[in-house]
Image (spheres, rainbow, N blue to C red):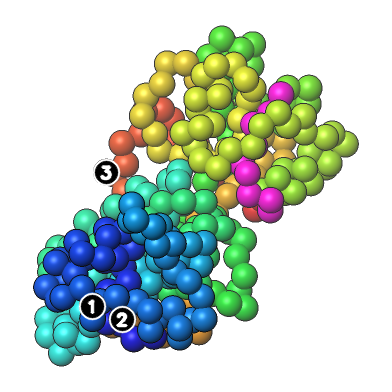
Amino acid sequence: MDFRSLKYFLVVAEELNITRAASLLKMSQPPLSNRIKQLEQELDTSLFIRKKSGLTLTPTGKILYKRARQMMELSERTREEIMHFEKELSGHLVLGTVEGRAPYLLARWISGFREEFPLVTYTIRNGGSDDILEQLQRHLIDLAIIAAPYNQELLQGFSVGRQPWVAIIPGDHPLAVREGDEILLTDLKDEPLILPERLSRVQAIERWFLEKDMTPRMVCKVSNYVNAVALVEQNIGICIFPQTTYSPNPHIVTKLIMDTPKYAEHVLVYTKDHPLSELAESFVDYVKDFLEETGGHSQKFQTTEREFALPEDATFL
């Protein structure tokens, strides 16, 4: 299964017509049909359902289509790394990030890194921690910012920032109009709660409540901050979430959860089984220098309300 055969397969899979695919590949139809048949024989499966009306991918054809695109992307990135190895630092970085504060951290690093290495280009992929980690471990992403904890046997990383856990409250809720910008965890005892979807997060919040002999009354789990805010706006419940950087919203109020306050932590990670490229290693070095010089703070964050300081007795959640 060589790259040329995969390229031919991808074009046929996208066109679902041998004649059009052959025209795009600037070759005649019979050799292309033979290549596809040889690929099917090699894999011992049918990749297409052939009808008079055209072609349709089989279930195994859909699997190969997904993997072939990934392999071609890796091939192109490898080619770029080799081409630029002995030239001025350039190339392409694929960076993964979870939502919340992480995209703002990443944007600040890219801004500074571009001042030193303007030839570098970037692709940024967003998702939940589990999704980003899966892409990282398949080497589809070079570096990723995720929420701790992470598997330290498979990944190497370091902390890039901590945020306090807060309650995102509907604007007309009694807890929202109460004086002050702090509430107690016990204030949430009987409230319907919206929690982060990640299993480790749910379990950690359950342990947090157990410290006060309570059980969280969960009504919904969400994978991202945007969904959390939308649900809070509609008074579905109160969301427990790490404080993030976001746009103004008159329908919600954010308050720091005190009485055993907790913090979440973002980490920059990369795989241990795959050496970093020169470009990725340079980016990691830049981030470490940035954190050492600034402590991770940046005046460029466009915050819309008070940034809560971490209480001295806050512990990791």
Q: Is residue 193 magenta?
A: yes
Write down the region rendered in magenta. Answer: 192-200
Badge 1: few (under 14), some or many (20 or more) residues near its Cα, within 10 Å? few
Check if mark 1's residue and mark 3's residue have beta carbons within 8 Å. no
Instruction: Give the CA separation, mark 1 to mark 3.
Output: 59 Å
Check if mark 2's residue and mark 3's residue have beta carbons within 8 Å. no
Q: Position of residue 163 (x, y in %)?
A: 52, 46
Task: Residue at 68% x, 53% y: name it.
Answer: 200
Pointer 2 residue:
34
Residue 4 visible, this angle: yes
Residue 286 visible, this angle: no
Amino acid type at circle 2 is Asn
Q: In the image, which is nearer the foreground, mark 1 or mark 3?
A: 1
Task: Residue at 51% x, 32% y: name it.
Answer: 227
In the figure, is residue 270 to the left or right of 18?
A: right
Badge 3: few (under 14), some or many (20 or more) residues near its Cα, within 10 Å? few
Badge 2: few (under 14), some or many (20 or more) residues near its Cα, within 10 Å? few
Disc 1 element: helix
Instruction: Give the CA separation, mark 2 to mark 3.
Output: 58 Å
Pointer 1 residue:
30
Residue 212 lies, with reference to residue 280, above or below; the image says above
Q: Residue 287 appears in which quarter of the rendering?
A: bottom left
Q: Is residue 130 magenta?
A: no
Task: Residue at 23% x, 77% y: name it.
Answer: 30
143 vs 39, nearest the viewer: 39
